Amino acid sequence: MTTMEFYPYKVYPPKLPMLVTPSVELPVSSDGALLAYRTDFEEVTLEIQVDIPPDLPERVVSLSERRRPPLATYVVLESIESRVRRAQKLDGLATSKVQIVMNRREFRGETAIRAVVVRTSDGRPSDPYAKHPGSVVAASEIQRVLFDEPPFPPGAYLEIKWVDFGGLDAPRWLQERANDLLALDLDQALPVLFLNSGVQHAPAILNSRGTRGLIAAARDSLYAGIYQYTMYALIDSAMHELASRQEEEDYDASELGDLLPGWRGQLLDRWVGQLFPDASDPVQALKRAVVTTPGVSELLGKRLSRALQKRPSTIGKAFTSLVRELQAEGRLQS
């Protein structure tokens, strides 16, 4: 479906030209996203230039309005994870620039930026053009900025199931944990994360789709706790398995995927760079660590907690969101 077909009024079909230039060098993904999470900068300024084609007004407003078209250009910034939505107005209907400052303490997850041209006043009902203020008549492509690495698809090394732990159909080992929110089964070919549907309000909160309010903040904090608990348990299991393979021939020369086929190898391969960010060869550093460090758990305690804090949906960021909502509700003083 084209843009012309989607809107119930005439719009400018080509995408608006928008150029985004960061104040610091940011890596770019294969699909054009700016990867802020791969840098150590606390703050980045984006200079955004929007070019308005000269023929745009004649395509989106009536003949009588084209001398002074009731249109305005905005740069819109949206982040569901950060609960941020802003619109900054640009000057006129020509080439304009605007600067947006993005701070790592405020933003997390993905932020979408795009330029739009909107109508600013009511139009005549009989015209085939937009009639209401705020109607979008032209837009640019979306520029994504990622402040956290996108989460690895759960299906790659984790299955998630809702089960009433206290139900008669639940496995006995889950029934013994009827008051727990979650449980992990690592003995399967693919580990399973069980979430307890018998915990009051848990399904409603965790499955909620809102982006603001206490329920959304509680959901994010719950997800953060579940995420850290689960990743710690999975990586702990993978590290213990790796340590058990140290007597195998070619241990030092083997890749993680060869030593640990399946989800454990995939998981460590993805995390090893985060666990040993300063090592010239993180894989060899991990292999030595699981052998020489007094206990894998000590290694996890030293390195994994720091790595987790830099990942998406961490406790710190979710807690900050919860505090903001409590302050907004007047239930917590600044």
Image (cartoon, rainbow, N blue to C red):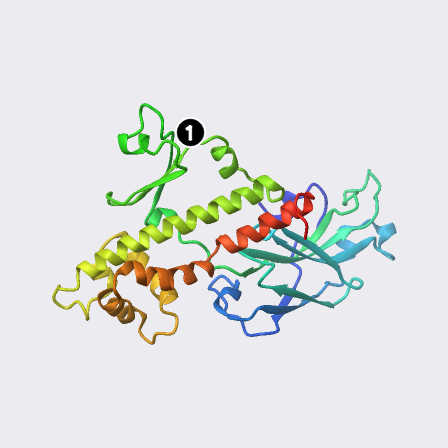
Side (left or right) of 293 relative to 113: left
Left or right of 6? Residue 241 is left
Q: In which quarter of the image is residue 170?
A: top left
Image vertical order of residue 294 relative to residue 188, above or below: below
Q: Residue at x 35, y 25 (%)?
A: 167
| Res 277 seen here | yes
Q: Which residue is drawn at 17% across and 67% down?
A: 251
Residue occupying the point 48% across, 64% down: 29
Q: Which quarter shows the N terminus?
A: top right
Above or below, 183 against 36 in this view is above
- Point 32% across, 70% down: residue: 282
Residue 307: x and y, percent?
Answer: 42, 62
Whether residue 199 sits left or right of residue 121 in the image: it is left
Percent coordinates x, y for residue 263 in the rendering: 28, 52
> Mark 1: which amino acid?
Gly
Is residue 165 shown above or below 317? above
Coordinates of residue 256 in the picture (x, y in percent) = 25, 63
Residue 12 in view: no
Q: Is mark 1 on a helix, strand or loop?
A: loop
Mark 1: few/some/many CA within 10 Å (<14, 14-19, 20+) = some
Identify the residue position indicated by label 1 in the image.
Answer: 198
- Toward which corner of the image does residue 139 lie, by quadrant? bottom right
The residue most toward the bottom is 280
- In-front residue for pair 170/141: 170
Q: Tag count in the figure? A: 1
| Residue 258, image x, y percentages | 20, 61
Q: Which of 111 and 211 is in front in this view?
A: 211
Q: Is residue 135 left or right of residue 320?
A: right
